């Protein structure tokens, strides 16, 4: 439920404004593939109070870590949501190609990672060793599996 809490915190305006702006979440569950669940149709379903739950979670995080550490946790959570929106198609050779670069760019930025490096990790396997790099492109299903494994 942490992802729903975070999105509710964003949409309710209870998350620190600078942090909210840096994670680029809009508060809509339907916009994030990892949260699209037919059993959860609305973030404000009347049964769970995700905003109140976020306040409790935030209070607990404040007791355990510094503001910057808490911000890093929030950035990683947001990166996972953006990573889930990285989608692939097969190019003419059957190799995985990223459709929309924006989710990749957002995830890489939040993870403080080079965008091209993240793209390479998601779309290619290194068959080389410590002395050489031999890249083998993934097909679309394998790239999707790799993305999901990285998010976990």
Image: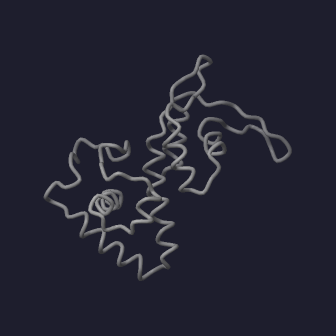
In the image, is 145 to the left or to the right of 13? right
Q: Is residue 29 above or below residue 65?
A: above
Res 142 → quadrant:
top right
In the image, is 12 to the left or to the right of 85? left
In the image, is 15 to the left or to the right of 122? left
Spot occupied by residue 101 in the image (x, y as percentages of width and height):
53, 37
Res 49 → quadrant:
bottom left
Number of numbered discs on residues: 0
Q: Is residue 90 above or below residue 52?
A: above
Q: Which quadrant is the N terminus positioned in? A: bottom left
Spot occupied by residue 86 in the image (x, y as percentages of width and height):
48, 39
The answer to which of 104 and 146 lies nearer the viewer is 104
Spot occupied by residue 19 in the image (x, y as percentages of width and height):
44, 65
- Residue drawn at (42%, 50%), measured in percent from left and top? 81
In the image, is 91 to the left or to the right of 14? right
Q: Is residue 29 above or below residue 50?
A: above
- Residue drawn at (55%, 35%), measured in percent from left and top? 143
Q: Residue furthest top?
A: 92
Q: Residue furthest right?
A: 131
Q: Is residue 3 above or below residue 31?
A: below
- Residue drawn at (65%, 35%), measured in percent from left and top? 124
The answer to which of 131 and 96 lies nearer the viewer is 96
Spot occupied by residue 5 in the image (x, y as percentages of width and height):
31, 62
């Amino acid at each position: 439920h942490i992802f729903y809490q975070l999105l509710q915190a964003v949409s309710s305006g209870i998350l620190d404004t600078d942090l909210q702006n840096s994670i680029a979440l809009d508060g809509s569950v339907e916009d994030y593939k990892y949260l699209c669940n037919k059993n959860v149709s609305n973030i404000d379903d009347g049964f769970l109070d995700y905003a109140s739950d976020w306040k409790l979670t935030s209070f607990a995080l404040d007791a355990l870590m510094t503001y910057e550490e808490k911000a890093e946790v929030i950035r990683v959570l947001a990166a996972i949501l953006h990573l889930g929106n990285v989608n692939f198609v097969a190019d003419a050779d059957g190799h995985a190609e990223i459709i929309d670069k924006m989710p990749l760019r957002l995830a890489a930025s939040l993870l403080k990672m080079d965008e091209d490096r993240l793209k390479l990790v998601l779309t290619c396997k290194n068959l080389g060793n410590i002395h050489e790099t031999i890249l083998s492109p993934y097909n679309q299903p394998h790239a999707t599996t790799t993305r999901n494994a990285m998010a976990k």
